[in-house]
Every structure is written in structure tokens, then in C-alpha cells.
Image: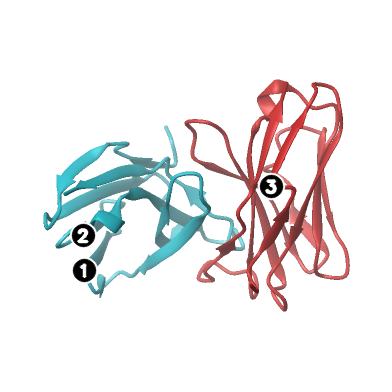
Chain colours: A cyan, B red
Amino acid sequence: RKEVEQDPGPFNVPEGATVAFNCTYSNSASQSFFWYRQDCRKEPKLLMSVYSSGNEDGRFTAQLNRASQYISLLIRDSKLSDSATYLCVVTFRGSQGNLIFGKGTKLSVKP
Amino acid sequence: GAGVSQSPSNKVTEKGKDVELRCDPISGHTALYWYRQSLGQGLEFLIYFQGNSAPDKSGLPSDRFSAERTGGSVSTLTIQRTQQEDSAVYLCASSPWTGNNQPQHFGDGTRLSIL
């Protein structure tokens, strides 16, 4: 079983749509959680950290459910520029920051 | 800019040759990480440095892979006797220090192709 699992997509949505991505992780010792964004043939960039209480950054909302070992990302009012691959990332207690990546969910926002 | 810099951007080499990849982290960042991304695969952790020390080498796929960091700054990842399965994008990231809450800043990567 993969440590971090995501639906690979692609998610094809129209501009203005709301889209949600889910991610599950297998290791209960997971400590920190992030969403990264990766554009085609580019490096990953941190989108947002995910906190237990849930957190919001503009159109983006992240949720964490430790009991279910589940993380989500909600994007409201999708823009063309949101088209990218969204990577679910976790770290484990004692790992010194080594990031464990999911394979990513591809989002394509159409006009 | 002042971001993470990697070189070369692209490297094409014949099977069996040695290659050396370079990473120049953000100035002042003590933590440095190497990952690789194979076609259709997620990013895979290889090794990290805290200063010049590499406490965790568990991610290196074989003994053909090695890495070093000197002066707490530039790091090189060396692959000896390259194989076709080594073809991937090798990404370097740095953060102010190690720790699970530190955001990591990635370089553009080195795209390695083994013929």
C-alpha cells in the first residue's frame, strides 16, 4: 500500500467551478501535512500547509481528519491559472522533514 | 534570483557513465534535500543534509548513488555506472533547518536521460 494516495484525475472543470481533491495517508505517525502545486515540467511549490483545525487561504481551503487519515483541498471559483498537478505531502514524526509525496491529482480548468 | 539553483538543467549520457548533479541552496539554509521524480511516478526522497552531515541515506536506491555537501552550502549527487532506470528529474530543495514544519523550496531540477 502506498504511503500517500491520491486520485490521479484528471479533473476537468469549467472556470468558476468548485473542485475538491482528497488524499489518504497510511502512516498514523504522520505529523505534518501540505499541499504542493506542480506545473508541467516545473518544480513543486508549496501551496499551503494543512492544520488540524482546517485552514483557508483565499479560494483554497484545506482540511485534515487525523482519525480517518484523510486530507482534502477545496478550490472555489476555479481560474485557468489553477490548472496544475496538486501534490499531497506528509512528513512523519522523527523524519527531519523528509517529504513523502503522493503522485498528484491533475486539474485542468477550461474556459 | 535567490532561489535554489541546480545544474545542469538537462543531462544526456550513455549507460555506464558517471554523472554529477549540483545543487546550490538558498543562502543560509542549513537543510538540503534530494528527491527524484521518474516518469509517471511521484517524487521520491533520496537523502537529506543537515549542514554537511547526512544522517539519513535510506532513500538512496543503490550504492551507485552518493551525495556530499561541503561548507554547508553546495551539494553534489553522484550516480556511478548509470543505468536506464536512473532516468528521471532530480530535484533539490532547501529549508532554513530540518524539521517537519519547514517549507521546502525546490530548484528547477536536473532532467537526466540515460541512453
Mark 1–mark 2 Cα distance, whole angstroms, equals: 6 Å
> Amino acid under label 2?
Ile
Q: Quadrant of the C terminus of chain B?
A: top right
Specify whether B26 is left or right of A106: right
Q: Which residue is mark 1?
A: A59
Q: Nearer the viewer, residue B29 or A79?
A: A79
Mark 3–mark 1 Cα distance, whole angstroms, equals: 34 Å
Q: Quadrant of the N terminus of chain B?
A: bottom right
> Amino acid under label 3?
Ser
Quarter of the rendering containing residue A104: top left
**In contact (CB < 8 Å): disc 1 and disc 2:** yes
Q: Residue under mark 3: which chain is it in?
A: B
- Nearer to us: label 3 or label 2: 3
> Amino acid under label 1?
Arg
Q: Which residue is mark 3?
A: B9
Q: Residue at x 27, y 37 (%)?
A: A10
